[in-house]
Amino acid sequence: MIDFNAFFSLIDVGVIIQSLGWIFLGIITFVEKFGPKDKKPWTALFTFIGKILTKEFAESQKALMDRVEVLSDKIEAVAESVAETRAIAARVRILRFGDELLEGRKHSKDTFDQALLDIDNYERYCKSHEGFKNHITEETVTFIQEQYRERLRNHNFTR
């Protein structure tokens, strides 16, 4: 009969584990070198270890990307609101300028040019936002453009 205590006293377990490790390392290296290109054990092993090590980072990155997406949506909503506010402000300036012309106030060419820029910006916004109430200024715009052409022909701007 075999005396296991005597057997294990002759064998160094550390040397066996170390030898098995080197054998495992040699087998994986051999398979990596001569195995099929799409099945590399080192690549698979390191990918597996990498996924374990970066799992928490990947989860936090996904959470961060979700937050960024929500913030991006909010920023787009704010930008749209700002664009609408600018269009409304341009509409107010157009209507006020038209009223001043109806009252007989004289304006410089630069003021007319600014009013025409407001008209262009307002009409561009209205074309790209069909739900926006955009028929409010049509008559006023026509009047401003007529006044501009008339004053341009007659050199009748204030200095």
Image (cartoon, rainbow, N blue to C red):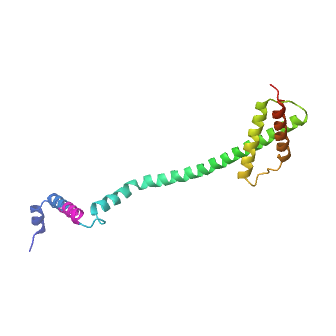
Name the one closer to the observer, 86 or 53: 86
> Which contiguous range is marked in magenta?
23-34
Taking the image as shown, residue 149 lies to the left or right of residue 42, namely: right
Residue at position x 62%, y 47% from top?
75
Horizontal and vertical percent position of residue 97: 83, 36
Horizontal and vertical percent position of residue 67: 56, 51
Report the magenta stretch's main SS. helix
Residue pushed farthest right?
103
Name the one closer to the observer, 85 or 139: 139
Horizontal and vertical percent position of residue 17: 18, 60
Name which quarter of the figure residue 7 lies in: bottom left
Q: Quadrant of the C terminus?
A: top right
Name which quarter of the figure residue 11 lies in: bottom left
Q: Is residue 25 magenta?
A: yes
Residue at position x 37%, y 57% from top?
52
Horizontal and vertical percent position of residue 41: 28, 63
Name the one closer to the observer, 74 or 134: 134
Q: Is residue 59 above or below residue 35?
A: above
Name which quarter of the figure residue 19 lies in: bottom left
Taking the image as shown, residue 58 lies to the left or right of residue 42, namely: right
Number of numbered discs: 0
